[in-house]
Image (cartoon, rainbow, N blue to C red):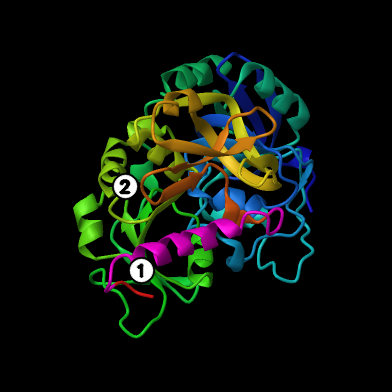
Amino acid sequence: MSLPWDRPRAVLLLEDGTIFRGYAFAGTGRALGEVVFNTSMTGYQEVLTDPSYKGQIVAMTYPLTGTYGINPEDMESAAVQVEAFIVKEYQSFTSNWRSDRTLADFLNEYGKIGIEGIDTRALTRHLRVVGAMRGIIATDTDDTDALMAQVRAYPGLNGIDLVKEVTCRRPYRWFQGRRIEIDRPEWLSDAPGFKVAVLDCGIKYNILRMLEKTGCQVLVFPAHTPAADLLACNPDGIFLSNGPGDPAAVHYVIDSVRELLGRKPVFGICLGHQMMGLAMGGTTFKLKFGHRGANQPVKDLTTGRIEITSQNHGFCVDPESLSRLPVRLTHLNLNDNTLEGMEHVKVPAFCVQYHPEASPGPHDASYLFSRFIELMKKNASAAPGHAS
């Protein structure tokens, strides 16, 4: 086992000129992105493969990373999505019966840089004070002037459509826990359950697992699919997925959601929540350093209960922009009082900003999938011919 100082040297440069130096335990070259931090103690594989992290360089605040390796069951997409990965100390010796490779092997497989040996606590404190920033990691040069020129030329995430980079290219079926390629989107005639059409803006696999677990048939459609095409397959409900980047930049999804509201029951998570807010006439804004971790306290304003939630987002729906709209606020973040959930008061549609499928509670928010089922049941009873 090599020691950190036996590995290639690496530099992390932030757009404000702050420099951190460490060592590369995976990958070589350079990586640009928005530098953010995640406060989860575990779940680094889920973080790495979550499409919502597209465009971001992620630092883990927990100091030791890699201890349980990587396994094929915990993938949230088909590839590593982060631009690069930062840890305090990389653990190359894995200890878990499910592991089939190391974290370094995993990052190398997808050509991603992983660095260790920097003070991640100092980095996190800096980002909390200054805010998430553009940055670059380099293992091939120490020329900070040249690297800063690259950082300044990088556009960042504001106003950028990253959904087009992570959405599926053609519809597919999610069946028995895996993705099934299909020639055309058709429901299984011999399978039970409500038919759910998923608009894929960067869907996590565990959301699809949860939909299937609650008894749904699931077809997944590219984000650019028009509302008319989704409605043509006659689903019982529409699901709006999570995804990366600035929601206001993804106009085609907002337009589709606006057409879908009132036509079918709709449930949105994370970016899907933001898309619904924009489609209803609200606005979004960028958080200073975002919410990323598995320990965010959220209050259900209906029941008064507190949920421990998993979150990954840098943008938020402005509740003031909803004040004159037919919208009821349902959930609130107790750390900063930002909006975490809402529902339309006239049509069957609701959404949450956090990730109920991630189960940090572990079952605090699983009721939301059951609520979606109830909405589809209610809509089916009012429209003969739907699944029961």
Q: Secondary structure at mark 2?
A: loop
On screen, residue 60 versus residue 321, left or right, reads: right
On screen, residue 332 versus residue 194, left or right, reads: right
On screen, residue 35 versus residue 267, left or right, reads: right
Residue 371 in magenta? yes
- Residue 231 visible in the displayed image: yes
- Residue 29 visible in the displayed image: no
* Image position, residue 351 (x, y; %): 48, 46
The quadrant in which residue 252 appears is top left
- Return the residue nearer the eye: 67 or 193: 193
Residue 358 in magenta? no
Q: Residue placed at 68% from the left, 59% from the top?
A: 363
Q: Secondary structure at mark 1?
A: helix
Q: Residue placed at 69% from the left, 43% from the top?
A: 304
- Which residue is under mark 2? 261
Q: Label 1 is placed on what type of residue? A: Ser
**The N terminus lies in quadrant:** bottom right
Q: Residue placed at 41% from the left, 43% from the top?
A: 344
Q: Which residues are magenta?
A: 360-385
- Return the residue nearer the eye: 344 or 288: 344
- Return the residue nearer the eye: 178 or 185: 185
Q: Which mark is residue 381?
A: 1
Mark 2 nearby-residue class (10 Å; few <14, some 14–19, many ≥20)? many
* Image position, residue 84 (x, y; %): 57, 40
